[in-house]
Image (cartoon, grey):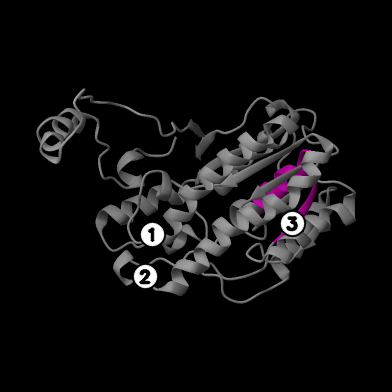
Amino acid sequence: MQENASSPMLDGKVIVVTGAGNGIGRDFALTLAAQGARVVVNDLGTSSSGEGEDAGPAQKVVDEIRAAGGTAVASTDSVAEWHAANRIIKTAIDAFGRIDGVINNAGILRDRMFFKMNLEEWSRVIDVHLNGSFFVARAASNYFKDQGSGSYVHMTSTSGLIGNFGQANYSAAKLAIVGLSKSIALDMARYNVRSNCISPFAWSRLIGTIPTETPEEQARVERMKRMETGKIAPLAAYLMSDAAQDVSGQIFGVRANEIFLFNQHRPVRSVHRSEGWTPQSVAEHAMPSLRAGFTPLQRSGDVFNWDPI
């Protein structure tokens, strides 16, 4: 557990972290507890592809938190089922009497090229990432609304924000989570509830499934191996705190010691014809004028192509 550089920022807060049995989620749970939060460590204990169940990972993190003097309880319910997701939030209410924050971190990968992806591979990833984020967030929403406070952090990815090969299911879910977070931020603002996204750059068991067949892919993975999961946690802890009360609807990224703010979709160029458009005039006028503003078809590694700082 990380030591506090100053007084704890999360004293009295109760925070649920999904997918907290390993990797980034584990570091979230440890850091939140070190900052004074009481933590619900949720993890179904599946493999990186979502197979099996094991209560061990969640309980192990709870034991680590308690050994360091913190407070935590385990939850092994699935985020991908409506009633189970509600039980995750109910665990916080039953154990600690309230809920102040939710970090939607649970995830799996079923990578496959789009033209080979089957229904089960698509549906399972959407269920865990997108439906799971909605289910858990929705389960906490009435508590947040009634108490007039709360904070959500949802995990997105540059696979959705920028692009990647062989991850149509994951990319679609992660970009949809951005829309979900923005909608929550807008709908819940009147109740002093915030919602933000983090796109993490770190070596984890999920990232460990990335192909390394070409020299470029191998170099990318070697760069990622130098990015520690624990580097993501300070930003998440801040976003859970009252110090972030004016931060909502944003997309952040963390890459080693760098913190990024991502832009969001807005018009970049426009063209106009008072007489309206025909297919021919679109080809002759609109596209040549708009082409200078086209976004290149790139992968995350093409954009973030420098060594982690």
Whether 33 is among the magenta residues is: yes
Q: Residues within 10 Å of mark 1 (few under 14, many from 20)?
A: many
Residue 245 % position (x, y): 70, 27
* Kind of residue indicated by mark 2: Met
Dot 1 amino acid type: Ala
| Relative height, residue 126 to residue 141 (above, below) | below
Provide the residue span drawn in magenta: 26-42
Q: Which is more N-terminal, label 3 or label 2?
A: 3
| Precedes in sequence: disc 2 or disc 1 | 2
- The Cα atoms of the two marked residues, 2 and 3, are separated by 32 Å
Numbered disc in front, either 2 or 3: 2
Q: Residue 257 placed where, x, y %?
A: 51, 34
Residue depicted at 66% across the width and 24% down the height: 246
SS at circle 3 = strand
The mark found on residue 8 in the picture is none
Mark yes or no: residue 256 visible.
Answer: no
User: Would you say the residues marked 2 and 1 are in contact, meaning their CB atoms lie under 8 Å apart?
Assistant: yes
Mark 3 vs 1, N-terminal side:
3
Q: Which residue is drawn at 60% across and 51% down?
A: 24
Question: Would residue 72 be found to the left or right of residue 263 on screen?
Answer: right
Task: Identify the residue position indicated by label 2 in the image.
Answer: 117
Q: Residue at x 72, y 48 (%)?
A: 30
Residue under label 3: 41
The residue at which mark 1 appears reads as: 168
Q: Does the magenta stretch include residue 157?
A: no
